[in-house]
């Protein structure tokens, strides 16, 4: 009788586990309740640890496989602040692996990105995050590489100043820069409210180099960018300043020296090189005022 009871409990556990995993067919479930699917396995023993710097190709999709973001990013992995965070996903991976994770959309945008949920997602929705772990660097490795790189490009700053001055003269731009060196030109005036810290703003932007070549465009992706104004790590520092000068409905052209853009390290994606001036055309579509 005891043997039959034990057998029944084992069978019940197996059935329950199958039901749980069948919530997302083809996905497994981690100890921290994250559903994941491994696409590429790596024999590398370099597993991601808190404090490591990782380079990834990363994309976000709805559960209906609608892609709304993809790009290459390099950043430092943090100790997970709550169970089921995106940092938990990174810590499950080794260099060379590729995997898709399913996370609650509201938790990811509100807690991790500290921004509002996009309008095309509901509070109960999940999203799929696919991570291709290209490189894993321990903190000491990253700092050595950064020190060597910065010493090599130290002379690029003066060259950038010459290039920017030549561009301003060729385009006959006589506007005075702000204290941070940004040239802000209003193309179409807005009549809506001004932006204050804590407001949620919706913008379309197109970024290009001084030679006219585009490197980023929300218009081409057909997906405007929404973020909380004043929150760190949402947009480049110069973009914060320009949006703070705008009213809802305004379109402006902004020329950023590298000090106000991607600096002496360049963009995390590697698309914008170090010491590179850039141009952004920005349209402030909507301003949602912060609740008192």
Image (cartoon, rainbow, N blue to C red):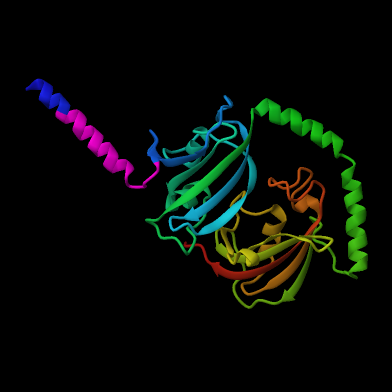
* Image position of 159 (left or right of 242): right
Image quarter in which the N terminus is found: top left
Choose top left, top right, bottom left or bottom right for residue 238. bottom right
Residue at x 79% of width, y 48% of height? 273
Choose top left, top right, bottom left or bottom right for residue 73. top right
Residue at x 12% of width, y 21% of height? 3
Query: Looking at the image, is 54 positioned above or below residue 63?
Result: above
* Image position of 245 (left or right of 152): left
Q: Position of residue 280 (x, y in %)?
A: 73, 63
**What secondary structure is the magenta-colored segment mainly?**
helix
Q: Position of residue 5 (x, y in %)?
A: 11, 26
Foreground of the two, 49 or 136: 136
Foreground of the two, 9 or 270: 9
- Magenta-drawn segment: 8-27
Foreground of the two, 155 or 102: 102
Q: Is residue 288 magenta?
A: no
Query: Looking at the image, is 82 positioned above or below residue 7?
Result: below
Foreground of the two, 94 or 258: 94
Q: Position of residue 279 (x, y in %)?
A: 77, 61
Q: Position of residue 123 (x, y in %)?
A: 39, 57
Residue lying furthest left in this view?
1
Residue at x 33% of width, y 41% of height? 21
Choose top left, top right, bottom left or bottom right for residue 195. bottom right
Residue lying furthest top in this view?
2
- How many marks do you count on the picture? 0
Residue at x 54% of width, y 58% of height? 68
């Amino acid at each position: 009788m005891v043997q039959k009871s034990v057998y029944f409990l084992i069978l019940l556990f197996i059935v329950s586990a199958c039901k749980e995993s069948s919530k997302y067919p083809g996905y497994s479930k981690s100890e921290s309740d994250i559903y994941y699917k491994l696409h590429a396995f790596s024999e590398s023993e370099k597993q991601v640890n808190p404090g490591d710097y990782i380079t990834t190709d990363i994309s976000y999709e709805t559960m209906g496989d609608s892609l709304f973001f993809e790009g290459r990013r390099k950043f430092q992995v943090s100790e997970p602040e709550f169970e089921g965070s995106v940092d938990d996903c990174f810590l499950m991976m080794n260099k060379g692996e590729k995997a898709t994770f399913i996370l609650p959309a509201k938790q990811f945008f509100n807690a991790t990105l500290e921004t509002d949920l996009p309008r095309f997602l509901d509070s109960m929705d999940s999203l799929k995050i696919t991570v291709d772990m290209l490189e894993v660097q321990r903190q000491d490795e990253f700092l050595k590489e950064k020190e060597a790189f910065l010493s090599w490009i130290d002379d690029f700053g003066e060259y950038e100043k010459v290039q920017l001055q030549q561009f301003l003269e060729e385009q006959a731009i006589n506007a005075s820069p702000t204290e941070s060196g940004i040239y802000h030109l209003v193309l179409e005036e807005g009549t809506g409210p001004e932006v204050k810290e804590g407001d949620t703003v919706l913008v379309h932007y197109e970024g290009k180099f001084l030679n006219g070549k585009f490197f980023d465009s929300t218009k081409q992706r057909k997906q405007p960018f929404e973020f909380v104004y004043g929150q760190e790590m949402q947009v480049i520092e110069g973009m914060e300043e320009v949006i703070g000068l705008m009213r809802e409905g305004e379109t402006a052209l902004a020329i950023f020296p590298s000090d106000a853009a991607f600096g002496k390290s360049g963009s995390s994606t590697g698309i914008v090189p170090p010491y590179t001036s850039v141009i952004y055309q920005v349209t402030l579509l909507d301003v949602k005022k912060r609740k008192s």
